[in-house]
Amino acid sequence: MTDDERDTLQRWARRAKPSQALAQRCRIVLGCAAGKSNKDVAAEVGVWAQTVGIWRQRFIERGLEGLADEPRPGAPRRITDERVEQVLVATLERQPADATHWSRASMADESGLSKSTVGRIWKAFGLKPHLVDTFKISNDPQFIDKVRDVVGLYVDPPESTSPSSPTGRALINTRPAR
């Protein structure tokens, strides 16, 4: 291991949140470079000894580039980040012409993606267009008068009534406790 590689590994190992996996791999390689066994490094870093062996070997074969993540298995993504962004912008900033909110089907028609894909995008970003986060005031013209009537009953209830159940029995026990 060269001095430059050691300096880079030590710098990467001190990283905070962005890449904890890379920082852990750097701590593994630095422990191995200090002459420790796989088992000792594994106990120190908190991984399996086999994991230490994997990262030791990858560093020996490929150097610093060997510590980077390899491509994941499976088919490559077919939906670009731009398409995802278009769905997000449309969901958050526009309203469909014939509805109060987007449904998966209406967004799928709008974006040209499948309903399942739209649902996966919304789930990944925690979007639920059918749920409303704000308080909605009724558009009933007599709404204010009805609110005043209901609030008035709570603030100044008629003296002849007390809270009761549908069976007519009082819900509040007015007898003093023994």
Image (tube, rainbow, N blue to C red):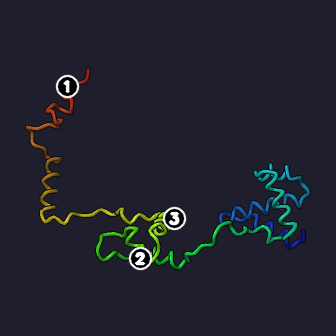
Specify which label sits upstream in the sequence, 3 or 1: 3
Q: Nearer the viewer, residue 25 or 120?
A: 120
Residue 134 in the image, given as x and y percentages of width and height: 33, 63
Which of pointers 2 and 3 lies earlier in the amino acid sequence?
2
Residue that mark 3 sits on: 124
164 is higher (above) or lower (below) than 19: above
Q: Amino acid at mark 1?
A: Arg
Q: What residue is drawn where x is 15% and y is 33%?
A: 167
Q: Residue at x 9, y 39 (%)?
A: 159
Q: Amino acid at mark 3?
A: Ala
The kind of residue tagged 2 is: Ala
Residue that badge 2 annotates: 90
Name the quadrant containing residue 106: bottom left
Distance Cα–Cα, label 1 vs label 2: 61 Å
In 3D space, how far apart are the residues under numbered discs 2 and 3 (Cα atoms)? 16 Å
Residue positioned most to the top: 178
Check residue 175 in the rendering and tell me which mark sits there, or answer none.
Answer: 1
